[in-house]
Image (cartoon, grey):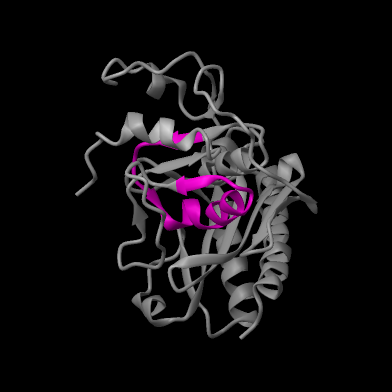
Amino acid sequence: MTTAAEDLALIAEAAREAGELAAELRLKGLQIDYKAGNSPVTNADLAADALLKYRLGQARPEYGWLSEETADDPLRLGRQRLFVVDPIDGTRAFLNDRPWWAVSIAVVEGERPIAGVVFAPQLHETYTAAAGAGAELNGTAIAVSGASALENCGMAGDPRLFEHPAWPIPWPAMRVEQRNSTAYRMCLVASGVFDAAVAPVPKHDWDLAAADLIASEAGAFVGDHTGRPFRYNGSKPVQASLICAAPALAPLILDRVRHIAEPK
């Protein structure tokens, strides 16, 4: 069995190849289709997915595979390790020539990621982590912020969410900014650019796994709105919600979101 560091080197190189391919295809003009739920998918998503499936499958044929753009194969459930992939996380940003899209790849062993990379090609940012070895941005160690109050904190999320009148307790004034890619939002928390990211809606494993490891290794709390950490490679690869936050902020956020009903 290869080490987490060896797997990280493999997926980091593959992520760069896939990101460069996606950027090249966009320059040539995209073919756009829509999946269930009106979610866009482009020829670049599919080409990057195919590249990664071939490249990683050739290197680690014994690993399972789970990707947003590939039909799920239940054989993954019996594999000791698997790749969890989103070839383009933040497709709407990709379509609109915003830089906040990324290639996200994790290696999951059992139920937890042991290697993860999130590569944002337009920003020239590569976030990486191996279990127990810390997290890095472009080869330099990163860590979460020391924020300890919600007031005036940096929150990566949809401003409309926090302004909604249904919250039992209104959120305080915060710097709230949207980033289309869930994985990239979590990496911004990992690097201390933002203090937290909140999404009280279900998220798929491929949205989360790589950035979960990166943020956790950088010192963040990562889990759902009940405070549970994520467990990956289940029969239904979906998590209830996302809370990613500096450790002192996490309990303050969880106090405000625990009332949310879990999806059935």
Question: Is residue 203 shown in magenta?
Answer: yes
Q: Residue at x 77, y 44 (%)?
A: 124
- The residue depicted at 74 percent of the width and 40 percent of the height is 123
Residue in view at x 70 percent, y 71 percent: 5
Q: Residue 229 versus residue 165: which sits nearer the camera?
A: 229
Q: Does the magenta stretch include residue 114?
A: no
Question: Where residue 55 sits in the image (x, y, percent)?
Answer: 65, 73
Judge whether 28 appears above or below 168 on screen: below
Above or below — where is 166 with respect to 41? Answer: above
Residue 41 point in image, percent of width and height:
48, 48
- Name which quarter of the figure residue 10 lies in: bottom right
Q: Which segment is the magenta one?
A: 197-222
Figure quadrant of residue 199: top left
**In the drawing, does residue 114 fall left or right of residue 67?**
right
* Image position of 172 (left or right of 83): left
Q: How many labels does the image show?
A: 0
Q: Is 87 on the left or on the right of 64, as rendered?
A: right
Q: Quadrant of the N terminus?
A: bottom right
Residue 221, percent across and down?
Answer: 50, 45
Above or below 79: residue 187: above
Closest to the observer: 232 or 227? Answer: 227
Q: Which residue is nearer to you in this view: 219 or 55? A: 219
Residue at far right of view: 139
> What residue is rendered at 57% in x and 56% in y?
213
